[in-house]
Amino acid sequence: MSRLRLWLRDDDAGPMRPELAEAIRLLRPRPIAFAVVPRWLEPATVRALRAFPEAVVLQHGIAHADFAPAGAKKIELGGKADRARLQRDLVGGRRRLQAAFPDQFLPVLVPPWNRIDPDVEAMLPQLGFAAISSFRGRRAPAVDGLLRIDADIDVVDWRKRRLLSPDELDRELSALGRDRGSSAIGILAHHAALGPAAVRAFCAWIATLEDRFPLAWLDPRALLAGVPA
């Protein structure tokens, strides 16, 4: 297997929850991309992430609100949402995060639930976003001026709402490593969905990867700069 090139995105940051504190404590100094919901952001979270200089901050939608029509899957960036208001709120959220994290914010949009309607995605470059980060398999037609830096492995089994076991995660990582060669592989975590014990278990798996796989942790800034992914 070629040397793995990994990067890590953790979604749903904003409130200073015990799970986030554990993730920060156990994952540093690895370069982690925290997807922050602008309207959830608390002063304690700003302080904690500023004290983690290796971390970067991405924008996780606006308020993680659902505008899906009845019976449809949840979506904030699309559905029944008023497009003019979405544009204003996306820009407002970006400015808030830029002000809170002047040295760590990257103009990357992470859609809540990894869903975004194509017409909203097409707006992103004019709203000041350089990239979108969703999940593999949910790719829309390419948008000029917008990079894609999607995650590849979700560590949560959402049907059973549990953390995948170390063996399950190892199998996924090994399979992707064989298929992707030297291309970057994104790991997607959700501290708020796991609980402190599962966060510790996930971080323990991360900590052992260096002993079991040839790998390098990529700074998300390098992906945004156009390093092949």
Image: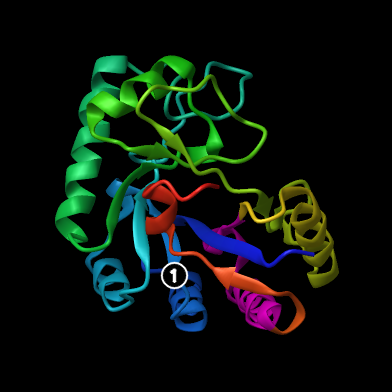
| Range shown magenta | 185-210
Which secondary structure dominates the residues rendered in magenta? Answer: helix
Q: Decide whether residue 110 is among the magenta residues.
A: no
At horizontal 24% and vertical 16% (from top left) the residue drawn is 84
Residue pointed to by mark 1: 31
Judged left or right of residue 166, residue 227 is: left
Residue 204 lies in magenta, yes or no?
Answer: yes
Q: How many marks?
A: 1
Q: Is residue 11 above or below residue 209?
A: above
Residue 147 higher or lower than 142, as above or below:
below
Residue closer to the observer: 19 or 52: 52
Quadrant housing residue 120: top left
Residue 52 drawn at (x, y percent): 33, 76
Q: Quadrant of residue 130?
A: top left
Q: Is residue 209 left or right of residue 12?
A: right
Packing grade of label 1 (10 A; few <14, some 14-19, many >=20) is: many
Give 171 or 73, whichever is nearer the viewer.
171
The type of residue carrying mark 1 is: Pro
